[in-house]
Amino acid sequence: MPYSKVEFYAAIRHDARVEGLSSRALSAKYGVGRRTVAMALESVWPAPRNQLPPRISRLDPFKATIDEILRDDLDAPRKQRHSRCPPTPAL
């Protein structure tokens, strides 16, 4: 199996030219759709991937409130932790 998409397209074009395989046979051999085979036969270079716009976080509306809570928490006294619990009296 070819390593990059360019090599993959080259392998498809090679098999179509040398072995004379049809697009259906090429799609079955490489496990891709016939549209991919047609694009490989049309162009040497694969089409670049579409860039998606950055996704908005669901936390964006609440980030100011969260930051305010965390800033207020910096001034709060430390919470006490007891390493041992006192023994419970026997009844």
Image (tube, rainbow, N blue to C red):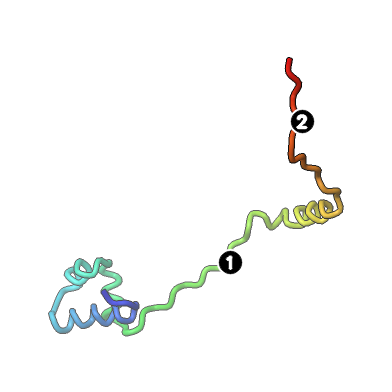
The x, y position of residue 88, in whole percent, is 74, 24
Residue at 81% x, 51% y is 73
The x, y position of residue 40, in whole percent, is 29, 78
Residue at 77% x, 42% y is 81
Return the mark for residue 86: 2
Q: Secondary structure at mark 1?
A: loop
User: Please, is residue 13 above or below residue 82 in the view?
Assistant: below
The x, y position of residue 2, in whole percent, is 28, 77
Which of 36 and 89 lies nearest the eye of the viewer?
A: 89
Quadrant of the frame with the C terminus: top right
Q: Secondary structure at mark 2?
A: loop
Give the left or right position of residue 52, taking residue 56 as reference. left
Say which label, 1 or 2, has the lower sequence index: 1
Residue at 26% x, 74% y is 1
User: Please, is residue 39 above or below residue 86 in the view?
Assistant: below
Return the mark for residue 18: none
State the residue position of label 1: 54
Q: Give the residue type at disc 1.
A: Pro
Classify 10 Å Cα crowding around label 1: few (below 14), some (14-19), many (20 and above).
few
Q: Quadrant of residue 70?
A: bottom right
Give the left or right position of residue 71, taking residue 21 as reference. right
Q: Give the residue type at disc 2.
A: Pro
The x, y position of residue 6, in whole percent, is 33, 81
User: Please, is residue 10 above or below residue 82 in the view?
Assistant: below
